[in-house]
Image: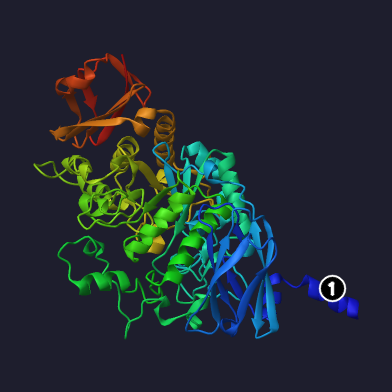
Amino acid sequence: MKRFILLIFMLLPACFLAAQAGIERVEPPFWWTGFKNPGLQLLIYGKDIGNKAVSIAGGKQSDVIITAVHKVRSPDYLFVDLKIGASARPGTYTLNFSDGKKLFTSFKYELKKRISGSSLRKGFDNSDVIYLVMPDRFANGDTANDNIAGMKERADRSKPDSRHGGDIKGIINHLDYLKELGVTALWMTPLVENDQPVYSYHGYSATDFYKVDPRFGTNDDYVKLSEALHQRGMKLIIDEVFNHCGSEHWWMKDLPSEDWINQWPEFTRSTYRAGSISDPYVAVADSTQFSRGWFDKTMPDLNQRNPFMKNYLIQNSIWWMEFAGIDGIRQDTYPYPFKDAMSEWGKRMLEEYPDLNIVGECWMNYPATVAYWQKGSKNVDGFNSNLPSVFDFPIHDALIQAFNEKEGWNTGILRLYEIISQDFSYPDPKNIVTFADNHDVNRYLDTQNDDIRKLKMAMAFILTTRGIPEIFYGTELLMTTGADKGHGSIRKDVPGGWPGDVRNAFTAQGRTQAENDMYNFMHTLLNFRKSNTSLQTGKLLHFIPSDGIYTYFRYNSQSTVMVVMNNNEEQKLHETGRYREILKNFKSGKEVISGRDVTDLSKLTIPGKSVLIIELKH
């Protein structure tokens, strides 16, 4: 009997043993040696743990030391500051918790060896094309995890806003599809646990910052995805949310302190006016409500002014980078948190990963207000975000209008020219992410009355202008919202991603003729861009649109590409004499999409609502 009891005890999960010993959580759950910043702050949670004294054992005395122990309002938390010395070796260190002279409990904390150091972490850049996936809606590779016992929401594909069962395994199963298409970096909406009663599939209401949602898979599955991408020469971009968590997050039942989140006498929603932070004339009431108001009733607003919260978020970001070999970060609702804390986060990340790229969601409509948030901006208030990249929302807005409007003095395709001409606002206009649509806005085809010609023009533009292009999943398959409205319908399932689907759009045989035509267009252009350095890092020269035609060039010492966009309904015979300053050295070219030779560059025939992309030859 004693042997049986001992065996059961040995088989119990470590988290259960820790809970029995009085500790329910330690976050980060483990760490690494070899970081430039030797500091680490542990959040320790357990009944009355805040009333215990803490000491550490293991290794030499100078390896890992406790520099401070912080008590907070709740007696169930301790924040313990450690210094991990340069001589610290990977291994297990024991944290002892004492009640007076009596040992209350112990916890073994592991320090791992860094395997994928900063020298191997090259962030996404201009050579990349980012593909945005919502894991719940892309493909279901493991139907066994569609529903998890004890979790609050169950899968129901009949409802647009419910979980549909897509997961990490489904994405891994289709990585060859993405590689063949020509994308080089994968951005997925958050994979962390969202154990909310409803509307939990999107991932933006975290209930555990250190755990992949079991309906997507496990933490180890996430590592497998990272490895599978890297084996194919592709990059992984993590989506993080520092502004808010989910209302069912484990700490909401017992906050460390009143100021752990931003609280109001009654529910107060953010104004969503991100421009109020850079507004030199803003009222304090407006900027306060923007940054401290809640994004939604189920999304408590995190208070990054609290130093423990700030450290928690920074360390969580570093932890995922190191754990899964992440190549880049997309930060949700970037201007909403306390901006000085976000600046410190960016600085810390770039110190540990100098070649890392981070793009922030700065959803504003003017280049100047977006540029305020890019690292190195000469802001009058002296603020430097330490955020390398931003999303080009002004280009997104212009793309919706440009091909729908009649040509005029300040309408039509001129809108694209006007936005590009304001690139002087950005410290680094090449390092901004361009897109026609994403998971938060209407699919581009919906905005263009399902006109595929306009979709091709938009894709051609973001894949040939400056910046880093992002493509929303299914664009290459002509996915639309359809008659249904709302986010759930914007984020439809990819046909063929689920067992029993009547067709498989991941294969040419399963696509319609129109879908194959669009796929082939994207495939050709993406793979051309992958090998053409002028479209990646070359200079941009553009000419003021005239008669509904916008012409620009991307060029470097190796290649020159000419792009001519005809926004008219009718075909145009376009004289090119005004482009002599750059065309004078070229005699011919090859049109990229059709593959046909262009022997006369002096005049070009361009069908209505179309684009010519010509690789020029001497």
Give 223 or 130, whichever is nearer the viewer.
Answer: 223
Give 54 or 594, whichever is nearer the viewer.
Answer: 54
Give 52 or 161, whichever is nearer the viewer.
Answer: 52
Residue in the image at 41% along x and 69% along y:
244
534 left or right of 404 in image: right
Can you say whether 120 is above or below 601 in the image? Answer: below
Q: Could you classify mark 1 by the number of other residues whose Cα lies within 10 Å: few (under 14), some (14-19), or many (20 or more)?
A: few
> Is residue 332 in view from this perspective?
no
Residue 118 percent coordinates (x, y): 52, 45
Q: Image quarter for residue 516? A: top left
Residue in the image at 37% along x and 70% along y:
305
Residue located beneath label 1 in the image: 7
Q: Image quarter for residue 559? A: top left
Residue 429 percent coordinates (x, y): 29, 42
Q: Amino acid at mark 1?
A: Leu
Among all residues in the image, which is located at the extreme left? 409
Residue 45 percent coordinates (x, y): 57, 77
For the N terminus, the image quarter is bottom right
Residue 579 percent coordinates (x, y): 18, 23
Question: In the structure shown, which secondary structural element does the residue marked by tag 1 occupy?
Answer: helix
Residue in the image at 66% along x and 55% along y:
89
Among all residues in the image, which is located at the extreme front? 61
Give 17 or 514, whichever is nearer the viewer.
Answer: 17
